Amino acid sequence: MTLEKNLKERIKELTCLYEVSSIIVNNDYKELDKTLFSIALSIRKSLQYSKHATVEICSGTFHLISSTLTKKTVFIESNITIFNESKGYIKVYYPADKFTKKDFLKEEKKLLKNVAINVGDLLERVTIRENEAIVKRKMEHADRLSILGEITAGIAHELNTPLANILGFAELLKSKEAGSTQASKDLDKIINSAIFSREVVKKLMFFACEMPQNLGLTDIIPVINEAMNLLDPTFKKTEVKYKVTLPKSPVLLKADTIQLTQVIFNLVLNAIYFSPKGGLIKIILEEAKKKIILKISDEGPGISAEDVQKIFQPFFTTKTVGDGSGLGLSVVHGIIRSHRGTIDYQPNNPTGAIFIITFPKQ
Ligand SMILES: Nc1ncnc2c1ncn2[C@@H]1O[C@H](COP(=O)(O)OP(=O)(O)OP(=O)(O)O)[C@@H](O)[C@H]1O
Ligand SMILES: [Mg+2]
């Protein structure tokens, strides 16, 4: 290669590096594929035989190629590293019928390495931004739920005493009203409505973690088995199947067994409600080193991305009027939080809902 040609090549490479840096500086995170495509074109321009070259950039969900590849090729490649892990590559190809590997200059390999480092840095920043957005959303969600919890606790508390009075005095009147007079029937309606309202208040207090707890270290396997036994008739009636998978040895957890039963009840009853006839509900308990994981999955329609944000809020329901108060999952959330656990939703494959509860081991 003549000195002049050599110099021309160097200039092209330096121009490429400069271009890549300015493309990255001007990157719009919403249009990352555009940025990567400009980088690919810039690399191509810098090559000795640019007209014959094809550049491919591949990392995670991104995969782009500057032109279609011929069948047989020769190529050089450089790995893209994100947080010290190899997460993709940049490759430059020439068609094998006209070129050999020797046609790639030493400097071109070095250039590719430099660009791959820059692309890795860019993708690292993208990952950081995405993680920040997820954390922010989670915090906002937790904030809203805890404010809701405080308000609900206040309301439930205020309603508790007058409700107890309504119920108490109605029962007193009824004991004085003999026989089945109209007044006695009306009193029954008052009593039933008061009992229903008291249940709602109780659920609200659960959601707000205001319910007294009876925590003790217990094996939760019998708790799950007992809850499932109680639910068995409902399964038979609705023609939904279930399968319980439990570890062989006891799983010890510091828990309030009545509250834990309520969690299982609420989740399984939801799963049954949304299951098609013949659908399978799986209840799986697993023990990891530091965690106890309970999964409840069904084969119903699952929950839309939009609704997932709302399911733990009190009174959110998509059931038909009269079928649900929208308090089940709020109660579940309250109980699990008071056990220092977490509950997450995941879509089931191919369809359905999976609720995953994780308790830390003591
Ligand atoms: N397994 C599931 N499959 C599909 N959607 C579900 C499932 N579990 C919960 N949901 C959605 O979450 C909503 C809230 O559930 P939640 O248990 O809090 O209230 P509810 O079941 O509607 O009423 P309640 O539990 O008070 O009778 C449901 O109405 C439904 O839209
Ligand atoms: Mg429910």
Image (spheres, helix red, strand yellow):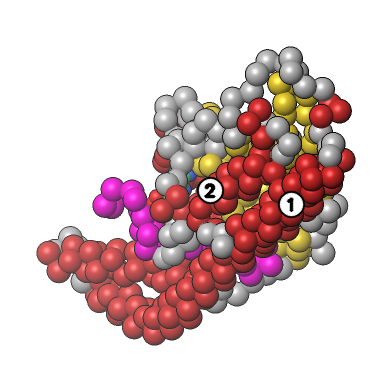
Magenta segment? 315-341
Q: Which residue is disc 2 drawn over?
A: 34
Q: Quadrant of residue 229?
A: top right
Q: Quadrant of residue 179?
A: bottom left
Q: Could you say whether the residue bearing mark 2 is in a helix, strand or loop? A: helix
- Of residues 122 and 245, which is closer to you in this image? 122
- Image vertical order of residue 167 relative to residue 49, above or below: below
Q: On the rendered structure, is 28 left or right of 21?
A: left
Quarter of the figure that contains the C terminus? bottom right
Q: Position of residue 335 (x, y in %)?
A: 59, 65
Q: Is residue 330 part of the magenta span, yes or no?
A: yes
- Image vertical order of residue 288 relative to residue 215, above or below: above
- Of residues 63 and 269, which is closer to you in this image? 63
Q: Is residue 132 part of the magenta span, yes or no?
A: no
| Residue at (58, 44) in percent of width and height | 37
Q: Position of residue 279 (x, y in %)?
A: 49, 28
Whether residue 222 is visible, yes or no, is: no
Quarter of the figure that contains the N terminus? top right
Q: Quadrant of residue 247?
A: top right
| Residue at (64, 23) in percent of width and height | 69
Spatial CA distance of label 2 from label 1 is 25 Å
- Tell me the kind of residue under disc 1: Ile
Q: Which mark is residue 11?
A: 1
- Of residues 226 and 98, which is closer to you in this image? 98
- Tell me the kind of residue under disc 2: Lys
